[in-house]
Image (cartoon, rainbow, N blue to C red):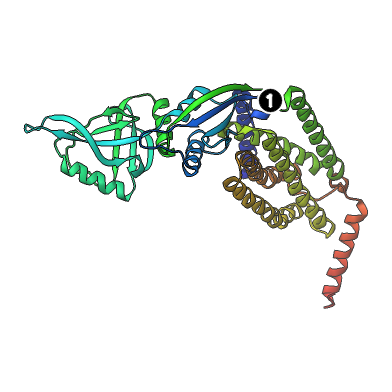
């Protein structure tokens, strides 16, 4: 019982934290619900790139998608509209200034070696052949002085190049260029093996994180220029959004009333668990930065239905156990234990489907898959942990004195006890059915 009380307070604290998060953090709405901006981007030709090919456009689109929508949850959409142009639609809640920078910056990283005079002084710099293409991963970190730096990890080929570069120019500086600008020129003290390097500078955490995102996404395969930008109104409108809220609320109320009518006290517990589930799920959406579109809301509503379905499986199994003559405590445990396999299997198949949709679908489909997956995971917690904990605390280990509390009749329980008693009498005389 002590463990159940502890878990009860854990659930209460988790619910209060969820309420605080929902109240304090803004809700990110997608382009179809809140509007945003539409940007037209055009790939540019240069002396080294006299013609923009379709392969270049595909690579440009993929790189930009990694830059401005790395997790696939911001609902930013990118599509090609002409031979050299891309259309980017951005929800209002996005940082438009930062998105513009990510769209136009080439993000070219290059290590340059010094050209020395006879006395060892640096005359100029030339390419060492070590570039961002040799980068495996970049991350934000701090140095010994507590200043923000960017840690670089090279792939196998890059590590070999870096080791050779630091071996050849030990005691001399090498220059680190980013977007054609020298960031630093550290002096090489010794040969560096292992493929680890560091970029230091006057970094704030925000700027270092932004540059890390650019480095991890990769340099643009071709320069791009913003041609036009205009505002986009929400496709659904405020009235449609409000109607969606009302429809969702009405649907939730009817589901809760059905659970209360059909399962009585367990239905009431399920309704409370459903409210806790909704609060936790919505808080997770806000913490992870999920942008809600109509598709995302659909995923959330579908997960609510699956949460209710789990409770129905549990309660029906519990009623069957009670009808078979079990005590209240053992019936509740058996109901949860025997329904768990079905709940787990159905939820896992849904999560696998969500994973496939997330990695293979468009951004809108990714939003649907992510909200549904989060909802399914939280629904398992609410159905198995929250509902079970509340059931045990309310009913304890006692006998079922009022079958109507479970939506059962006295005759259902009495008949079960009579059958059980008959079986025990037969067993005394060695007679078994």
Residue 122, given in percent of the width and then of the height, sits at 15, 30
Q: Is residue 307 above or below residue 202?
A: below
The residue lying at 72 percent from left, 45 percent from top is 392
**Residue 180 sits in which quadrant?**
top left
The residue lying at 88 percent from left, 65 percent from top is 419
Q: Is residue 13 visible?
A: no
Q: Is residue 186 left or right of residue 310?
A: left
Residue 22, given in percent of the width and then of the height, sits at 63, 27
The residue lying at 73 percent from left, 48 percent from top is 310
Q: Please name the residue that numbered disc 1 is placed on.
A: 234
Which residue, as the protein is rendered here, is positioned at the far bottom? 430
Q: Is residue 418 above or below residue 67?
A: below
Residue 103, given in percent of the width and then of the height, sits at 48, 30
The 10 Å Cα crowd at callout 1, few under 14, some 14 to 19, many 20 or more, is some
Quadrant of the rendering where the N terminus is positioned: top right
Q: Is residue 183 visible?
A: yes
The residue lying at 70 percent from left, 42 percent from top is 303
Which residue, as the protein is rendered here, is positioned at the far left? 119
Viewer-proximal residue among 15 and 298: 298
Viewer-proximal residue among 301 and 235: 235
Residue 158, given in percent of the width and then of the height, sits at 30, 46
Element marked by disc 1:
loop
């Amino acid at each position: 019982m002590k463990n159940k009380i502890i878990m009860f307070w854990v659930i209460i604290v988790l619910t209060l934290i969820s309420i605080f998060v929902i109240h304090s953090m803004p809700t990110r709405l997608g382009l179809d619900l809140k509007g945003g901006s539409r940007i037209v981007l055009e790939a540019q030709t240069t002396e080294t790139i006299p013609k923009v090919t379709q392969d270049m456009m595909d690579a440009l689109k993929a790189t930009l998608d990694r830059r401005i929508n790395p997790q696939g949850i911001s609902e930013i959409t990118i599509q090609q509209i002409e031979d050299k142009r891309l259309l980017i639609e951005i929800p209002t809640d996005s940082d438009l200034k930062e998105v513009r920078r990510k769209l136009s910056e080439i993000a070219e990283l290059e290590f340059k070696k010094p050209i020395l005079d006879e006395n060892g002084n640096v005359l100029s710099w030339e390419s060492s052949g070590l570039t961002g293409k040799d980068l495996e991963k970049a991350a934000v970190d701090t140095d010994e002085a507590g200043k923000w730096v960017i840690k670089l990890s090279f792939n196998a080929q890059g590590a070999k190049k870096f080791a050779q570069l630091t071996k050849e120019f030990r005691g001399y500086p090498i220059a680190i260029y980013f977007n054609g600008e020298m960031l630093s020129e550290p002096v090489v003290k010794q040969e560096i093996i292992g493929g680890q390097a560091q970029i230091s500078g006057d970094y704030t955490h925000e700027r270092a994180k932004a540059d890390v995102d650019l480095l991890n996404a990769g340099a643009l395969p071709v320069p791009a220029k913003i041609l036009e930008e205009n505002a986009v109104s929400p496709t659904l409108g405020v009235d449609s959004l409000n109607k969606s809220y009302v429809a969702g609320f009405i649907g939730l109320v009817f589901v809760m009333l059905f659970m209360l009518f059909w399962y009585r006290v367990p239905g009431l517990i399920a309704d409370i668990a459903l409210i806790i589930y909704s609060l936790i799920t919505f808080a997770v959406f806000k913490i992870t930065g999920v942008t809600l579109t109509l598709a995302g809301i659909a995923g959330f509503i579908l997960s609510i239905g699956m949460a209710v379905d789990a409770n129905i499986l549990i309660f029906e199994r519990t009623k069957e156990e009670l009808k078979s003559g079990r005590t209240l405590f053992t019936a509740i445990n058996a109901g949860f234990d025997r329904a768990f396999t079905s709940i787990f299997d159905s939820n896992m198949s849904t999560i696998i489907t969500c994973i496939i949709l997330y990695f293979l679908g468009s951004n809108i489909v990714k939003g649907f898959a992510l909200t549904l997956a989060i909802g399914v995971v939280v629904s398992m917690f609410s159905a198995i942990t929250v509902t079970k904990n509340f059931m045990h605390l309310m009913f304890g280990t006692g006998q079922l004195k009022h079958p109507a509390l479970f939506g059962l009749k006295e005759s259902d329980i009495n008949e079960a006890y009579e059958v059980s008693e008959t079986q025990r009498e037969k067993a005394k005389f060695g007679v078994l059915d």
